[in-house]
Amino acid sequence: MEYKLFIDGRWVDGGPRLEVRNKYTGEVIGALPTARREDVDAAIAAAAQAAPQMAEMPAHKRSEILAKTSALIRERREEFARTIAAEAGKALKYARAEVDRGITTFAIAAEEAKRIHGETVPLDAVPAGEGYFGFWVRRPVGVIAAISPFNFPLNLVAHKVAPAIAAGNSVVLKPASTTPLTAVKLCQVLTEAGLPPGALNLVVGSGSTVGEWLVTDPRVAKVTFTGSPPVGERILAIAGIKKVTLELGNTSPVVVAPDADLEFVAKRCAVGAYYNSGQVCISVQRIYSQRQVYEPFTEQFVKASEAMVVGDPLDERVDVGPMIDVREAERIEGWVQEAQAGGARVLTGGKREGAVYWPTVLTDVRPEMRVVAEEAFAPVAAVIACDDFEEALRQADATPYGLQVAVFTRDIQRVFQAIKRLNFGGVIINDTPVFRADHMPYGGNRRSGLGREGVRYAIEEMTNIQMVAIRLG
Ligand code: NAP
């Protein structure tokens, strides 16, 4: 199937063709042109031209477009899910769950579009403000460049496009080169829902060209990026003076206190570690178990890991499909072998066939090993024994990252001790770091990023506060 770029409300040609493959079979499932410099320029110009119209559009109209988009995705649920399963290699059941979340994200944005407001400011609180009336409002920033990763081709695009439209902005979207087809379908749906030409433009092509042309263009007022920390750093270095939101990686820790329900924790950790082949920014990677429950917990975790069904993501029974490409599977295979050479033990998994890497449990790891210190982004988790709860918290927090962390305990004292000790954007109690509801504030501290998503919080990042002071009399 041949697709095109979407610029100024029209499907247009561009430069060299990009083939998109099914990540399990390798079969070509679609192709589309990559954007040349002039195509990116046209997309930004169209967005800049549409920006005033979007800013003027009444809130109820923006809300209606977003609500209709949500309904249209629901109508095409299975088509979206199969596209995600094929182009991202995500097991169909999780691809369907992603589509359901995308439907919700647009529905939340439809609601939030109606409640963007400011507040009054008592200017006479200082002598200079006597005789003035003050208030502030939120104004859309203008053109937003949205750059998204491969691992959630619908919902992470939704988390950028939906709040941008809710706030009255226009968008140029650059999806990951491995997974652009879901984004094409989203553009179709938004157009059918009534979004005016130029309000959303789609350009496809490599990050180092198309991505950087967008990031550095002075007409772009804001860059919203989800992806890896090195690319996030690069974007921040070259963006110039514009707003930047960065949603980056993590080495997600889990702390298991001795009072936790070990079988439940083991099963939740297995889903949290292997879902989407561990290619989730909040995938379970480091599990700190107190020594007195380390053995029974590890036994349960290995059992739950071995229960995962590995195979073709389009097969209904499968839990774990391929990684995004064979190089990624070879990378993690190398990391695990390196850990083994340093004394780590593989309790299950450690096997690769093409792009498929089996759910893998490691133990006897050391903090400096890459499987612990760096984002694994693969179906690999390590169980680490700790002497006490305090030590488990210390090790969990000993990372340059800070997206989400989980603690399993029924002890309220431990809950509050954990909240205070952990420098993460999200602390999840009695579930894994993978927990996310699409309206909650979501984002990282430290090297995990800048800013927050979660529709309402993204709207705050995608608007400027405009202060109005009126001298009375
Ligand atoms: P990536 O390699 O950083 O790519 C993300 C996007 O950035 C892609 O569209 C990519 O284009 C583009 N890009 C690459 N280089 C660029 C540059 N120099 N300038 C502008 N754009 C550029 O990440 P990925 O492999 O797709 O995704 C995995 C990473 O995303 C992991 O680190 C994961 O933790 C993170 N992630 C974070 C969150 C979160 O919410 N915090 C959620 C999901 C994923 P190409 O595809 O053409 O290379």
Image (cartoon, rainbow, N blue to C red):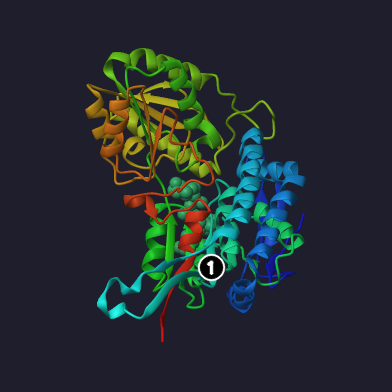
Give the farthest residue toward the bottom: 473
Position in image of residue 444 (x %, y %): 38, 49
Left/right placement of residue 204 relative to residue 463 reads right
Question: In x, y percent, where is residue 107?
Answer: 64, 50
Q: Where is residue 193 in the image (x, y as percent from the top left)?
A: 74, 60
- The relative height of residue 270 versus residue 134 in the rendered view (above or below) is above
Which residue is at the front of the view, 383 or 29?
383
- Labels in figure, total: 1
* Point 64% across, 66% down: residue: 200
Which residue in the structure is indicated by mark 1?
144
Disc 1 marks which amino acid? Ile
Q: In the image, is 277 to the left or to the right of 342?
A: right
Q: Please identify the quadrant where the C terminus is shown.
A: bottom left
CB at disc 1 and ligand 1 closer than 8 Å: no
Looking at the image, is 403 positioned above or below residue 36?
above
Residue 205 shows in the view: no
Q: Residue furthest front?
A: 473
Q: Which residue is drawn at 73% across and 45% down?
A: 74
SS for tag 1?
A: strand
The answer to whether residue 160 is seen in the rendering is yes
The local crowd at label 1, few if under 14, some if 14 to 19, many if 20 or more residues have their Cα within 10 Å, is many
Quadrant showing the N terminus = bottom right
Task: Please provide percent x and percent y for residue 418.
Answer: 29, 33
Q: In this view, does 66 lie above or below 96?
A: below
Q: Pick the residue in front: 290 or 5.
A: 290
Left or right: residue 111 compared with residue 440? right
